[in-house]
Image (cartoon, rainbow, N blue to C red):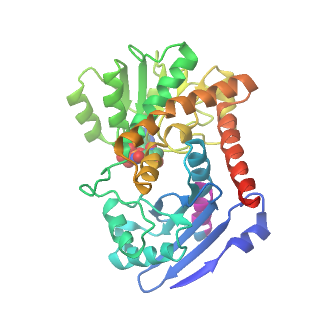
Amino acid sequence: MSCFDLTVPLTARAADAFDHERVLLFQDPASDLKAIVAIHSTALGAALGGTRFQPYGDDEQALVDALRLARGMSYKNAVAGLDFGGGKAVIIGDPNRIKSEELLLAFGRSVASLKGRYVTACDVGTDGADMEVVARACRWTVRHTPGDGSAADVSDLTALGVLHGIRAAAYHRWGTTSLRDRTVGIAGVGKVGRLLADRLFDEGARLVVTDVREEPVRRLVGKYPQTTVVANTEALVRYEGLDVYAPCALGGVLNDEVAPVLTAEVVCGSANNQLARPEVEKRLADRGILYVPDYVVNAGGVIQAAGQLRRAPARRIVTRVERIFDTTLAVLERAATEGELPGTAADRIAERRLHAAAEARVAGR
Ligand code: NAD
């Protein structure tokens, strides 16, 4: 196993773009492991963020992804009020081809060598069973195995958080938290999207959905025959009478093509990094469309992970997720008062907390 510290060369190359505390490359040729662990900030506590396992065009792309995702976790955890910093790991390669017990154990040893500065969990390409293997080599792992007292799937609390984000946006925009007879368009009815659909139906909302796969749509329509199905995301964003657009599939869906045609008044969904570029938020705002920053409302999963690590009772974790309502409202109200975009307001709230914690640490408090 070899470990290269990338922090210094990165800082020398572009200090402002890469303001991470530590970036490490781990390689274990015996198991094919090649992983980057990026620790953005431990000002608030141990860096907490999942492990993404996927192929990349080249190592540079993997590095940029790890850096971007790690910083995103610092902001998400800070706004959610968690006492955890932000970090992320990426394992480079096709999980269907190279994932093995040896590789996951080698990865676990890599994370363990950081002695708790980084705590890992599932992400795209890794699941609860993988984390069980990683946990054998590393105690700084969030486990999600049914039967051990932890929740089996974080998607339910992610969906709950998104619902509270939508309710807060409704209150800010329409003066009521009620979603009765509001039309919500969900793009992607996978793990989060379908659980969000359940909760929205309970609230009396009307649903319009789309997914690239037939099976989850069929399942949803079987359960709720009143669901309207449209062919694709292009049709969904143009659907007449849409109140809320909830992207719950991929990132980058709010782009220069969607901004001029979107019919919804509010965008609030679980997908990470919805804005293809930050400027699109302004284009939406110019058309009177309220964009609720994704990382503010999709924090349910990490709130659950943090709660598990602190051995918090399940009820307290749910209450914390429900507080996404207050956090979202605070972001939207600050944006309105300061005349800034919600994305900027959320970033400022996160940065203020991160800077205060960093200063307190320097001062030895
Ligand atoms: P998932 O893979 O279970 O579901 C995604 C769904 O989107 C799938 O059904 C897929 O077929 C569909 N899809 C893919 N491309 C599409 C397209 N172009 N148009 C319409 N549908 C499309 O994933 P998930 O766990 O539900 O996560 C959804 C999003 O929320 C992701 O961006 C994820 O990063 C984010 N997120 C998830 C969690 C969580 O707890 N699962 C937490 C935070 C953020």
Front position in the image: 18 or 258: 18
Residue 122 drawn at (x, y percent) = 41, 58
Part of the protein shown in magenta: 60-69
Left or right of 289 in this view: 214? left
Q: Tell me which image quadrant ligand 1 sits in.
A: top left
Q: Specify whether residue 339 is in view.
A: no
Quadrant position of residue 230: top left
Give the tally of numbered discs.
0
Dominant SS in magenta = helix
Please name the residue shown 69% across and 71% down the image: 7
Question: Vertical placement of 249 versus 141: above or below?
Answer: above
Front position in the image: 149 or 156: 149
Residue 358 drawn at (x, y percent) = 71, 55
Please name the residue shown 55% across and 85% down the image: 2
Residue 318 drawn at (x, y percent) = 39, 39
Question: Vertical placement of 297 versus 31: above or below?
Answer: above
Residue 67 is one of the magenta-drawn residues: yes
Residue 216 drawn at (x, y percent) = 28, 39
Furthest toward the left, the residue is 222
Q: Specify whether residue 200 is in view.
A: yes
Quadrant position of residue 156: top left
Quadrant position of residue 365: bottom right
Please name the residue shown 56% across and 61% down the image: 46
Residue 116 is one of the magenta-drawn residues: no
Front position in the image: 104 or 207: 104
